[in-house]
Image (cartoon, rainbow, N blue to C red):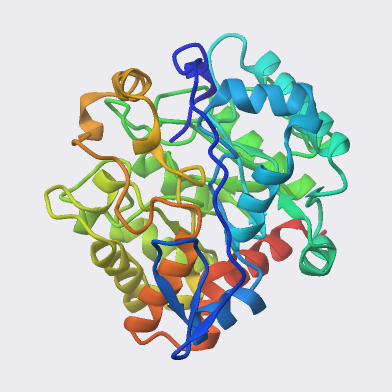
């Protein structure tokens, strides 16, 4: 959901509070991963998290963009407390894509990748960039926080050859559109969706050739289906939900799109954004789990993943004025309510809560390992292979 155009709106103090972390303590077969007061997690959930390659396929490092700018300009300020918070989250791989767009999208894209590459180089002791399938195997043993570089719009591709250019800068995923129309196709909240343009077809073809993943999370329905139809490689939905469970929310995906994910052998990442989960209260973690169940029943759990669409803390921790400005930057069809996050999925260790939920819903260990990251690893390895 994040948009880099809102950086001016969200400048200010959004303190990055370091999360307290206690060594795991066994207590009646459960583990305590927080300082007091804190929930306990089952031994099974902790073991699943420890042995899985846990991937969040849409999670920015911070919604405090000025702080993120500071980390990139002075990597040493990404300090021990913040690093501990990231590592104790249990998430091994982040896809910190943001939205860009407008007449200077190319320059925005260049700045985004320059900033990230400088940051990664400046903290290569704790951070690593994932460029190829083989990199996945190194993440756990390295002990580093891994990043897949991508963007939530493809307006920076002025011509097909720009796909090659940005691939060289480390981009491995490109969402074709954000919420509105661009030269490629249409976004999910655009008034009308005529699908991929001829230029869009050329961009998808070039992305296939250079092995860059096509993402349609924010795309309109026709553009989404066109991408699945024309792409020679699986198309990703990194972060979206089931429209049938959220009273027709335009940012969610239709059953037809979900079936296309299954047919393509691809993966759909489920988010915890409140209005994408349900259109009324109460909205709980159980409602979010209903989206996992819906997709699993329709096309199988091997096509499920996680794309939380938040940073480690969530939107509701933003200062009220900045939260208000963020909400105002979207169309009314987004349907914001009092809260954006879902309690239980709005904190750094949310993946442990999700794992417990999947256990409650009777998923097997193998299925949960796939949802936590194995499924996205599989499909990205296929897309990135020549």
In this rendering, is residue 366 above or below 165?
A: below
Residue 371 showing in the rendered view: yes
- Residue 140's x, y, as percent? 77, 68
Query: Of 5 and 310, which appears nearest the observer?
Result: 310
In this rendering, is residue 217 above or below 380?
A: above
Looking at the image, the residue that sits furthest to the front is 36
Quadrant location of the N terminus? top left
Query: Of 296 and 225, which appears nearest the observer?
Result: 296
Looking at the image, residue 304 sits to the left or right of residue 265; the answer is left
Instruction: Give the quarter of the image for residue 47.
Output: bottom right
Instruction: Give the quarter of the image for residue 384.
Output: bottom right
Looking at the image, residue 145 sits to the left or right of residue 353; the answer is right
In this rendering, is residue 142 above or below 13?
A: below
Query: Of 371 and 32, which appears nearest the observer?
Result: 32
> Residue at horizontal 81%, vertical 49%?
126
- Residue 303's x, y, as percent? 49, 70
Quadrant location of the C terminus? bottom right
Instruction: Give the quarter of the image for residue 338.
Output: top left
- Residue 282's x, y, as percent? 13, 55
Query: Of 227 and 279, which appears nearest the observer?
Result: 279
> Residue at horizontal 87%, vertical 44%?
124
- Residue 354's x, y, as percent? 41, 68
In this rendering, is residue 16 above or below 302?
A: above
Residue 112 showing in the rendered view: no
> Residue at horizontal 69%, vertical 22%?
70
């Amino acid at each position: 959901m994040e948009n880099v155009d809102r950086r001016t709106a969200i400048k200010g103090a959004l303190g990055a509070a370091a999360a307290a972390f206690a060594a795991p303590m066994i207590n009646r077969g459960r583990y305590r991963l927080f300082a007091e007061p804190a929930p306990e997690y089952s031994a099974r959930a902790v073991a699943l998290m420890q042995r899985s390659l846990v991937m969040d396929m849409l999670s920015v490092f911070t919604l405090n963009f000025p702080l993120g700018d500071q980390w990139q300009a002075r990597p040493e300020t990404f300090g021990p407390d913040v690093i501990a918070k990231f590592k104790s989250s249990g998430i091994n791989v982040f896809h910190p894509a943001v939205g860009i767009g407008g007449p200077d999208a190319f320059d925005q894209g260049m700045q985004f990748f320059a900033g990230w590459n400088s940051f990664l180089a400046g903290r290569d002791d704790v951070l690593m960039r994932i460029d190829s399938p083989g990199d996945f195997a190194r993440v756990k043993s390295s002990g580093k926080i891994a990043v897949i570089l991508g963007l939530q719009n493809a307006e920076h591709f002025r011509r097909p050859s720009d796909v090659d250019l940005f691939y060289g800068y480390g981009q491995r995923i490109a969402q074709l559109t954000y919420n509105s129309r661009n030269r490629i196709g249409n976004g999910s909240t655009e008034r009308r969706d005529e699908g991929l343009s001829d230029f869009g077809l050329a961009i998808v073809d070039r992305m296939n050739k250079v092995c860059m993943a096509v993402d349609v999370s924010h795309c309109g329905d026709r553009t989404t289906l066109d991408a699945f139809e024309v792409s020679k490689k699986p198309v990703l939905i990194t972060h979206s939900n089931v429209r049938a469970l959220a009273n027709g929310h335009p940012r969610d995906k239709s059953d037809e799109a979900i079936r296309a994910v299954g047919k393509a052998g691809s993966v759909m990442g489920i988010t915890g954004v409140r209005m994408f989960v349900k259109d009324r209260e109460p909205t709980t973690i159980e409602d979010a789990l209903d989206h996992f169940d819906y997709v699993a029943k329709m096309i199988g759990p091997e096509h499920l993943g996680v794309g939380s669409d938040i940073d480690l803390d969530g939107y509701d921790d933003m200062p009220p004025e900045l939260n208000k400005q963020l909400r105002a930057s979207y169309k009314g069809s987004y349907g914001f309510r009092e809260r954006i996050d879902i309690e239980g999925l709005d904190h750094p260790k949310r993946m442990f809560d999700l794992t417990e939920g999947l256990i409650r819903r009777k998923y097997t260990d193998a299925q949960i390992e796939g949802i936590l990251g194995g499924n996205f690893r599989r499909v990205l390895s296929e897309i990135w292979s020549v």
